[in-house]
Image (cartoon, rainbow, N blue to C red):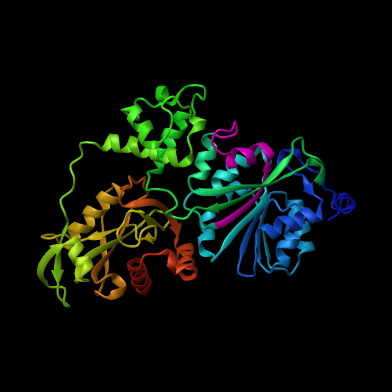
Amino acid sequence: MKLSEIDATLREIRVSPVKTLGQNFLHDRNLARWIVERAALTADDYVVEIGPGLGALTEFILDSGARVLAIEKDQRLVEFLRQRFAGARLEIVHGDAFDFDVRALFAEQRVKLLGNLPYYISSQLLLKFTKYPSPISLWLLMLQKEMARRISAAPGTSDYGALSLIVQLQYRVEFLRAVPASVFLPEPDVDSAFVRITPRLPAELPPHDPETFLRIVRLGFSQRRKQLRNLLKAEVPEWEQAAAAVGFDPRARAEELSLEQWVALSERSRSALATGQIAAAPERFPVVDENDQVIGEAPRGEVHGNNLRHRAVHLLIFNRRDELFLQKRSRSKDRHPLLWDSSAAGHVEAGEEYDATAARELKEELGVTAELTRLAKLPASERTGHEFIWLYRGEHDGPFQLAKTEIEHGEFFPIDIASRWVSARPQDFAPGFLECWKAFHAL
């Protein structure tokens, strides 16, 4: 819409922009078209638009053929949008974006998010919709210019800080262009900017523990004027050696280290804490025949390397809302790293029975105990990794203490979302889980 059309429309629908809702309506059609073009939308995309307002972006998003879910807090604008785009591929949700259940987006094949985030809550919304792991493949956001500079900042700049690294650990952030206040009605008090955010590839950074990384970064930026050696001396022993190994001046301050150096420094901290731990003995699994009868035992590597039949358990843990807990496998797993899997799972070890393994895996991977019930037994096949699997069900509301060496992330999902997710994106899941999911639904 042009400026005159926006003014006339607001009068017609009796809407006065509400400052507390961050309502500033874009009236530059060329800019709106440019924004949507940066998203490279196709008919295969499912677009979430936050704060569509009068539909400046919505119009061009729909022209691409994409399906759109627009989240609008102002009921008056919801009614206007439903009339303006009646019959289009548009679903409008009346509500606060803070209350939107992001988990529902896992059930869509390819999700992109566009929006002009209200400046007074932009950081909270940004962190909500970029929470790792995310079903969203691209974010194209209009933010307050200061915020855009902060999350896209490079080392050695005044904008570079803890927020920069928190976002950039999982995502690449591009500062696309500044946007003057004059393209909005009413004009905001500050200038804006557009950023494009995309997920990092799994192998783009060395293996790291996100919790340790965030703790070290926040501590390092807690007093920007101090040298890091004074802030991190309790976390990183032998500071001089650490600085030389990671490649920075031992007198450096927080803003001088790159993302890669922060990752390396956090891993040195984690390694220091782990010093003295006893290495686990190599695992040995019972080898079984086609009838699941034990015929011997062998080390883990030999069992997997030679595709020998062996035994495993999978656990489906539900909370009181009947939501299923799913785990995202660690990036260090030798099979199916970073794929989603059952709540807990593991191999039956030599001299162990299925039920004992199920209880042990629940304790080791999730840090809890619960009553477990056998649901079904799956035959060994190529799809199960040549494992005979007993599938169990249990109930627990958490919180869980996830085994970091086994699990990257875990979260509860409503059953209907999990079912649609498996159907839309089976490649997101470990093959063994897909077989267990079929067996669960066949009960």
Considering only vertical position in the picture, is 125 above or below 308?
above
Foreground: 193 or 431?
193
Q: How many marks?
A: 0
**Residue 196: x, y in percent?**
62, 51
Residue 269 located left or right of residue 119:
left
**Residue 436: x, y in percent?**
33, 69
- Tell me which residue sits at (75%, 52%) in the image: 53
User: Residues in magenta?
Assistant: 137-160
Foreground: 163 or 72?
163
Indicate yes or no whether the magenta region holds residue 258.
Answer: no
Looking at the image, can residue 212 be seen? no
Considering only vertical position in the picture, is 386 above or below 225?
below
In the picture, residue 156 is in which quadrant? top right
Residue 425 located left or right of residue 68:
left
Residue 220 located left or right of residue 373:
right
Considering only vertical position in the picture, is 3 above or below 354?
above
In the picture, residue 24 is in which quadrant? top right
**Residue 246: x, y in percent?**
39, 37
- Tell me which residue sits at (39%, 40%) in the image: 264
In the picture, residue 393 is in which quadrant? bottom left
Q: Extreme bottom residue here?
A: 290
- Tell me which residue sits at (74%, 56%) in the image: 34
Residue 37 located left or right of residue 10:
left
Considering only vertical position in the picture, is 272 above or below 92?
above
**Residue 179: x, y in percent?**
75, 44
Which quarter of the rendered picture does the N terminus lie within? bottom right
Indicate yes or no whether the magenta region holds residue 155.
Answer: yes
Foreground: 47 or 174?
174
Which quarter of the rendered picture does the C terminus lie within? bottom left
Looking at the image, can residue 371 be seen? yes
